[in-house]
Image: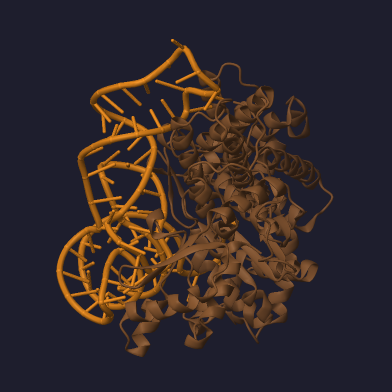
Chain colours: A brown, B orange
Amino acid sequence: MYIHHTLQRYIATALRDFDVREHDIHLEHPADFMHGDYAINSALIYARNRGIAPRELAEQFVQELTKDMPAYLERIEIAGPGFINLFLARPFLQSTLADIIADSVHYGRGSLLSGKRVLIEHSSPNLFKPFHIGHMMNNAIGESLVRTAEYVGGDVIALSYPSDISLGIGKAIWFLLSNGGKEALAERATLHEQILLLGSCYVQGVRAFDDTPEIQSDVREITRQIFEQEPTPAYELYTLCKQLNIDYFIAITKRLGSHFADFIFESEAGVRGQDMVRAHTPSVFRVSNGAHIYEGEQDGLHTRVFINAEGYPTYEAKDIGLLAIKFERYQPDISVLITDHEQKEYYKVVLAAAGNIAPVWRDCSVHVTHGRMTLLGQKMSSRLGGVPTAVELLDTLRSDVYEKNTDASDDLADAIALAAIKFTILKTQAGKNINFDPDQSLSFEGDSGPYLQYTHARIQSLLTKGEGMGIHPRIDGALSEEVLLERMLYRFPHILERVIKDYSPHHLAHYALEVARVFNSWYGGTKILDPENPHAPYYLGLAQATGIILERSLYLLGIHAPERM
RNA sequence: CCUUCCGUAGUUCAAUGGAUAGAACAGGGGUCUUCUAAGCCCUUAAUGUAGGUUCGAUUCCUACCGGAAGGACCA
């Protein structure tokens, strides 16, 4: 149990005669340390209903709270219009530092999601199309939520939903088949080059389809063969290409720090969804102009087509099938889906329809949306191929790292480049658009991933040097003058709960920045490894605890914290 | 036309209805014979407009202005 839980319970118990419920106690960290470590505004809120002056009620509250004050509290004050400010006692703060060091990589683990199965779908790729920076955005948020949900006790299953079937893919296969087929692929030496070839087949196939109507029936025939899984050369080539794309997807998401427990393919969901929709017509869906539709107006939404007049499932039906497979296979308590916010209204209709088939599909689903990335002020679109792929962007940033640090290994350069990109994405609240200006957003200075990594690496260096000098980190013993850092580190577990509550890792990103800033500011004015100073072991312990919090924060953001840089 | 989302320093982002709206970048000025200068210290600068609710509004409500996304057989 962490301090915010303990405190909340204590306050609720102390104030039970005032009918203040635990749930209604809002513990917040005041912006200014002068206002204590925690503040509650309960007196302000409750005074309204009672017709008492807020400060007067606050005084009654404080009287109860101080009657038998626990040791972890130093004092309680009333401030402003009736805030109650709580100051944690320094011995408590120091015991927390000791806990952090003792628990190390387990510090902050919690029970918020204990016993809950949490499904998180993210990074769903369009096979045959490049993994571009929009996918990186989805991946960064998804991976961070996966790690954080796991950290607070969830039984988390990460999965991805690759789009493996479409007319567009038929176009790509047609083009490749007409331009060398399997042999053309075999000429490419690496997986990366093969993927580039497939990407260009996609673009050229789409163009050929639009420009030369004569080929359209051939393309449709190939697409049909793929759909029906007929053992033709086209289907055989498709199977090969699909596997290459999956291999590539696994490789790139691994480089980004993700792995998936399962893939559910669009082709699979399509079949399932189509059956599902037909089985629930006319109870849920209705046939109109030959198409199976769901009339969203009954839920204040709009009508969408689930099976088109030609009898093919649309994305809507596939999403129904996907829900069916997810809940059948995993029985999740919470099923999180991460997409860009263009799909927000769309997905409301899907969930409304789904809720009429099985209420849990709707009630246990959470749709987390992220904004769109704009690059240099231009709206991104994967269609024309003008958008950098994840690999291109990463490699570009890596060369910037080498410029700054000529000794950097490939792994280190990759870790720093990734940190820059991921942090840019994660410091913004999920749901908002992100302006992606490589020159500015991806800076290695200031509010950035590399800043956090640098601070962490610097602490590791201190620890190594301290070891050599015979200074060992120690929290007990002589107290120094108070260091602001002590009032920052214990907050970590509380922040994780907010990340999960809001499904937005940006809380953690900003917290980590604040920790790093406070540390650097202290470091700038204090000599830590001073053999003459009796407080040196304590200082080093404080640095060590800070290093742990930074490393854990970075880990939960999906960012690697190098020992040295 | 309808629905949803978004308007905060020059720029990129914070602020769970709270206390003096915080950072970073850019600009200006300092700082390495001393633990990693990817750092630190100082400095200029912001809530689209008009109302309303509240002890208190960047946050909630209404209208307007501006931007984005979605709105039946595309994905």
Q: Horizontal placement of A89 versus B14: left or right?
A: right
Asked if residue A235 is positioned above or below residue B50 in the image, the reply reads above
What residue do we see at 67% from left, 75% from top?
A361
Q: Nearer the viewer, residue A152 or A529?
A: A529
Locate residue A497, reporting x and y percent.
58, 62
Locate residue A529, reporting x and y percent.
57, 27
Q: Nearer the viewer, residue A14 or A212?
A: A14
Quadrant of the rendered image containing residue B64: bottom left
Quadrant of the rendered image containing residue B15: bottom left
Q: Quadrant of the C terminus of chain A?
A: top right
The total of numbered circles placed on residues is 0
Q: Horizontal placement of A58 versus B9: left or right?
A: right
What residue do we see at 70% from left, 63% from top?
A119
What residue do we see at 67% from left, 69% from top?
A334
Locate residue A221, reporting x and y percent.
70, 52
Asked if residue B65 is positioned above or below residue B55 in the image, the reply reads above
Q: Nearer the viewer, residue A280 or A178?
A: A280
Quadrant of the rendered image containing residue A256: top right
Task: Decide if residue A123 is in sight here.
Answer: no
Task: Decide if residue A300 is in sight here.
Answer: yes
Asked if residue A368 is positioned above or below residue A284 in the image, the reply reads above
Locate residue A491, reporting x and y percent.
55, 55
Q: Quadrant of the N terminus of chain A?
A: bottom right
Asked if residue A259 is positioned above or below residue A561 in the image, the reply reads below
What residue do we see at 56% from left, 77% from top?
A289
Q: Horizontal placement of A289 versus A245: left or right?
A: left
Q: Nearer the viewer, residue A385 or A181?
A: A385
